[in-house]
Amino acid sequence: MGPKTVDYIGNLVGRSQVAIDVHLRAFAADAGVSGLTYEQLQAVYEETATLLGQEPGGFEHAVRRFKSQTA
């Protein structure tokens, strides 16, 4: 089991965290952020969520939903 699966399961059981997937990587790349490890990109999303006053899991969901609609 990889880190994305662990983070996704964490969200299912009520932990608010970011599970990096292709949509979140593509959104970051569109913003000029690429070449980061899973953990580094996760930290970027978590810090961004904090700066915006959002829960990490909710911010992740919003980005994923936006990117899947524009793909």
Image (spheres, rainbow, N blue to C red):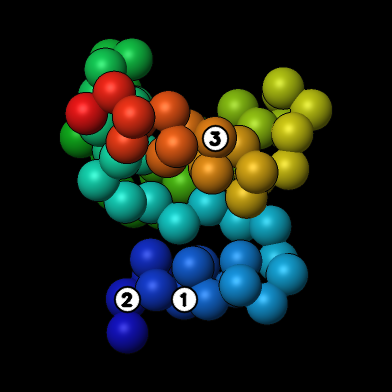
Q: Could you say where residue 69 lies in the image, as x and y percent from the top left?
A: 34, 29
Q: Quadrant of the N terminus?
A: bottom left
Residue that carries the numbered disc 3 in the rendered image: 62
Name the front one of labels 2 and 3: 3
Q: Could you say where residue 8 lies in the image, as x and y percent from the top left?
A: 49, 68
Going by the numbered disc 2, the residue's amino acid type is Gly
Q: Kindly state the secondary structure of the residue where label 2 is placed.
A: loop
Name the front one of labels 1 and 3: 3
What separation in Å lies between label 1 and label 3 (alpha carbons)? 20 Å
Going by the numbered disc 1, the residue's amino acid type is Val
- Residue, x 61% and y 72% (percent of image)? 12
16 lies left or right of 5: right
Labels 1 and 2 touching (C-beta < 8 A): yes
Residue that carries the numbered disc 1 in the rendered image: 6
Q: Is residue 15 above or below residue 30?
A: below
Q: Is disc 1 surrounded by few (<14), some (14 to 19) or many (20+) residues within 10 Å?
A: few
Q: Kindly state the secondary structure of the residue where label 3 is placed.
A: helix
What separation in Å lies between label 1 and label 2 (alpha carbons)? 6 Å
Q: Is residue 3 above or below residue 47?
A: below
71 lies left or right of 56: left
In primary-sequence order, the first of circles 1 and 3 is 1
- Residue, x 62% and y 50% (percent of image)? 57
Residue 40 — which label?
A: none
Q: Is residue 63 above or below residue 19?
A: above
Residue that carries the numbered disc 2 in the rendered image: 2
In primary-sequence order, the first of circles 2 and 3 is 2
Q: Could you say where residue 45 lies in the image, as x and y percent from the top left?
A: 52, 36
7 lies left or right of 2: right
What separation in Å lies between label 2 and label 3 (alpha carbons)? 23 Å
